[in-house]
Amino acid sequence: MQPAVERKHVVVIGAGIIGASIALRLVQEGHRVTILEPGEPGGTQAASYGNGAFLSPASIIPMSAPGLWRKVPGYLLDPTGALTIRWRYLPRLMPWLWRFLASGWTETRVERTAAALSGLLQDAPARHVAQAEAVGRADLIRRDGLIYAFADRDAFREDAFSWRLRDKFGVISRELEEPELRERLPDLSTGYRFGILVEGGGHCLDPGRYTAALVAGAVRGGAELVRADASGFDISSGKLRAVHGTSGDILCDAAVIAAGVRSKRLALTVGDNVSLESERGYSIEISDPGIALSVPVMPQDGRMANTMTANGLRAAGQVELASEDAPPNWHRTDILLEHLRRTWPGLALKKTPRRWQGNRPSTPDGRPVIGAARGCAQVFHAFGHGHIGLASAPMTAEIVAALIAGREPPLDLAPFSPARFG
Ligand SMILES: Cc1cc2nc3c(=O)[nH]c(=O)nc-3n(C[C@H](O)[C@H](O)[C@H](O)COP(=O)(O)OP(=O)(O)OC[C@H]3O[C@@H](n4cnc5c(N)ncnc54)[C@H](O)[C@@H]3O)c2cc1C
């Protein structure tokens, strides 16, 4: 445990993987920490619960890519596709969608985001091991690599730009020809004949339980967990005095907004009108699936993570654009199951799969918002991690801890600035 330069009382708003990692880090640096969370830490309400569990240094490519606008109508018209919009939310989503397409308009823009995300992700598995060890749950993190599976080399070539960028930013990967792919994944459908192995990749065996373990570790280290919602801030003469919670005001020296998709309203109260929407996703989990995955697999046609977790085989994916409060459309989980059956022909379904829907807190450019609020220097943003929040949580925690201690952050924070939305 490192002594803090100056011990502060910090309120961390939200106990998903981002808030949990930050709270633990702040406790380790000697701060007094109060965690505000209305639900269970890492519970089903959090995106951190049912995600794909990938800890991938290769996840540096944003969703929006050059030419995507041409493909969007096809995606949307395909009822079994990985992307869908609930049309009645379209007017509300338009500003976000426009920014989303614009952010991937050119290769240069995509490269800028990949460079920024590589700083957050390059050593993510090792950071998770250290974080998990600190709370006695190293058993929840694996570092055996990840495989991206393609129909054939031509399908891989369609993705060549992304893999060139990954190469450029130091992601170590290796091509797997069909015999080696089959040897590593004997249960994989013969429809996949080419793979990329990301040797430095890892995964989490139970992201919800891991998040809860980090919070429990922070509490053992002295943090207080308060079951309440944060509703705003008491700021006097530009200086933070307290966080308003449904349990009352909590006096503090600093606060961190890590409320996932619900962070937008809180950010607005401290002067930052960020572009943040839910990219809703789904997962299913199958106990005793009758097949083995030596490592997690991303079949590139389905764009979903297939991961063996502590509770069975999990398939996580789908992007559904709608309000975070819209009811789940469980048909999206049928699509995941159908794809899973095609990918793993030997799959056994002894019980009904467990289903889950969650809200990725997503900015249009695929970069999180990390840094001090423009309206109050003692309030810090740590949200908007979209598709990479699990993997990038420990680095986010290191950055926030540096900002709170007044140290130079380990990364250039300009790409993550709340000011970039205008
Ligand atoms: C289907 C799917 C697959 C994914 N796969 C991966 C993957 O393989 N790898 C990866 O790295 N990422 C993945 N992600 C993304 C990742 O899950 C998220 O980026 C990450 O969980 C976001 O964490 P968070 O802590 O910001 O938000 P959350 O986990 O949503 O937590 C926010 C917390 O804040 C609380 N809260 C909300 N409002 C308030 C308030 N006013 N006051 C106090 N607390 C509040 C909520 O109750 C919640 O517990 C996936 C996401 C989905 C949906």
Image: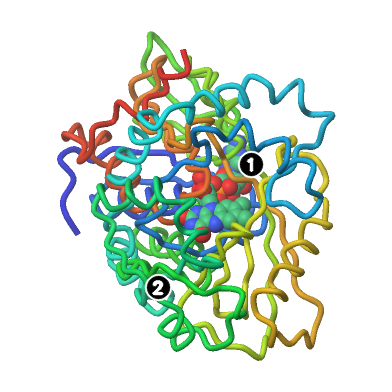
Q: Residue 322 placed where, x, y %?
A: 74, 36
Q: Which residue is found at the position 45% from the left and 47% from the top?
A: 19
Does 85 appear above or below 289? Answer: above
**Mark 1 = which residue?**
279
Q: For the residue marked with disc 1, what is the amino acid?
A: Glu
Residue 192 visible, this angle: yes
Q: For the residue marked with disc 2, what is the amino acid?
A: Ile
Relative to 369, 73 lies left or right: right
Mark 2 to mark 1 CA distance (whole Å): 26 Å
Q: Residue 89 placed where, x, y %?
A: 79, 29
Q: Which residue is found at the position 64% from the left and 38% from the top?
A: 71
Mark 2 Cα-neighbour bin, 10 Å: few <14, some 14–19, many ≥20: many
Relative to 350, 361 lies left or right: left
Q: Residue 44 placed where, x, y %?
A: 66, 58
Residue 227 visible, this angle: no
Query: Viewer-proximal residue, 154 or 171?
Result: 154
Q: Tell me the mark number nearer the camera, choosing from 2 and 1.
A: 1
**Mark 2 = which residue?**
141
Mark 1 Cα-neighbour bin, 10 Å: few <14, some 14–19, many ≥20: many
